[in-house]
Amino acid sequence: METSQTILVQAANGKTGRRVADRLERLGAPIRRGSRNAEIPFDWDDPTTWLPALKEVQAVYMVYTPDLAVSSAFEAIRSFTQLAVQTGVRRLVLLSGRGEEEARRCERIVQESGLEWTIVRASWFNQNFDEGEFLDLVLAGEIALPAGSAQEPFVDVEDIAEVAVAALTQEGHAGQVYELTGPRLMTFAQAVSEIADASGRNLRYADISVQEFSRSLSEAGLPQAHIQLLEYLFHNLLDGRNAHLCDGVRRALGKPPRDFRDYARKAAATGVWNPVEQTV
Ligand SMILES: NC(=O)c1ccc[n+]([C@@H]2O[C@H](COP(=O)([O-])OP(=O)(O)OC[C@H]3O[C@@H](n4cnc5c(N)ncnc54)[C@H](OP(=O)(O)O)[C@@H]3O)[C@@H](O)[C@H]2O)c1
C-alpha cells in the first residue's frame, strides 16, 4: 500500500495511538494525530469533528474511547465506518479487546464495511501499570484489585503498535483478526511481584471484592460511568475466558511477543515507579 495519503491515528496521545503515530512518522507516512485537542480535532462524542478529521484520509487506526464495551460504542462505530466509506477511506485497523461480546459486534461492523480491515484484538496492556489505570496503585505501594488468581497474558503495547503499523502500511494483513497476547499467562500478583523486582519497590498485591474496589474508586472521585466500566472489565474478563495464549503477534510480525519482565525493566529505568520526592 502506498503511503502518499494521510493515515488518521485515533487516540494519538494514548498508549497505543502515540506509538502507532510515532512509528508511522519514522516511516515517513503522512499522518493526522487524532485528539480532541488537535488542530483538526477528533472527538467520538462530537460527530461534527469526524468529517474534517477524515479529509483526504486513506487509512484509519481506530481506537474507541473508553472501550468498545460501552453502550455508545456500537452506534459510534457504525456511523463513523459509514462516513469513512463515503469519504474514500480504503483501510480500517480496529483496536479491540479480547473476550468482549460487545466489542465483537463493533468488529463485525468494520468487517462488513466493504473496506480492507484488520482487527487487532488485544489482551490487557502491560502499560496499564505505568501509563494507565494502575499507576497510582503502584505508586501507593499496594495494588488492590478484584482480580483473584485470574491468569491474564498481558501484552506490550509496543507489539500492538507494531502490528497496527504493519496492517496500516503493508499488504497481507487485510481480513485478519490478530488476537494479541504476551508470551506468558500471569496472575496480577505475579505482575506486581515482577514490577517490585524491577523497581526495587516494596509492593503488595491485595485481592479485594468488586464491591470494595468500586467503593474505593467512588471515594477517589471517579465518575460513575468509569467505575461501571472497570467493574465490567474485572467481573467479566477475568473469569477464565481469556486465560490462554494466542499467536497474533507471531502471525502478524513473524516474531514472538515481548515479555512482561522486559517491559518492567524498561519502565523501571524511566523512574516512573520511583518518583523523586519533591522538596519545597
Ligand atoms: N488498556 C487495556 O488494557 C486495553 C486492553 C485491550 C483493549 N483496550 C482498548 O484500547 C482502547 C484505549 O484504551 P485505553 O484506556 O488504554 O486508552 P488510551 O489508549 O490510553 O487512550 C486514551 C486516549 O483517548 C483519547 N480520548 C478520550 N476521550 C476521547 C473522545 N471522546 N474522543 C476521541 N478521543 C478520546 C484521549 O486523547 P485526547 O485527550 O488527546 O483526546 C486519550 O489520550 C479502548 O478501546 C480499549 O477498549 C485497552
Image (cartoon, rainbow, N blue to C red):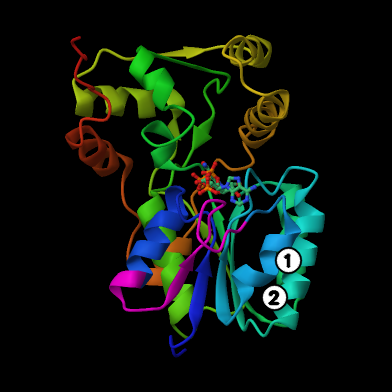
Task: Pick the quarter of the image with the C terminus.
Answer: top left
Amino acid on which disc 2 is placed: Ala
In the rendered image, the vertical position of residue 48 relative to residue 188, given as above or below: below
Residue 80 image label: 1
Res. 26 mark: none
Q: Is residue 198 above or below residue 279?
A: below
Instruction: Quadrant for residue 58, please give it.
Output: bottom right
Residue visible at 40% across and 64% down in the picture: 21
What amino acid does circle 1 point to?
A: Phe
The residue depicted at 69 percent of the width and 49 percent of the height is 68
User: Mark 1 to mark 2: distance in Å?
Assistant: 6 Å
Type of secondary structure dominating the magenta stretch? loop
Region in magenta: 25-42
Would the CB of label 1 be found within 8 Å of ligand 1? no
- Seen from the viewer's position, the closer of residues 24 and 106 is 24
Q: Residues within 10 Å of mark 2 (few under 14, many from 20)?
A: many
Count of marks, rendered view = 2
> Regarding mark 1 in the picture, which secondary structure is present there?
helix
Q: Is residue 251 visible?
A: no
Tell whether position 28 is magenta. yes
Residue 84's tag is 2
| Residue 225 vs residue 179, the one in the foreground | 225
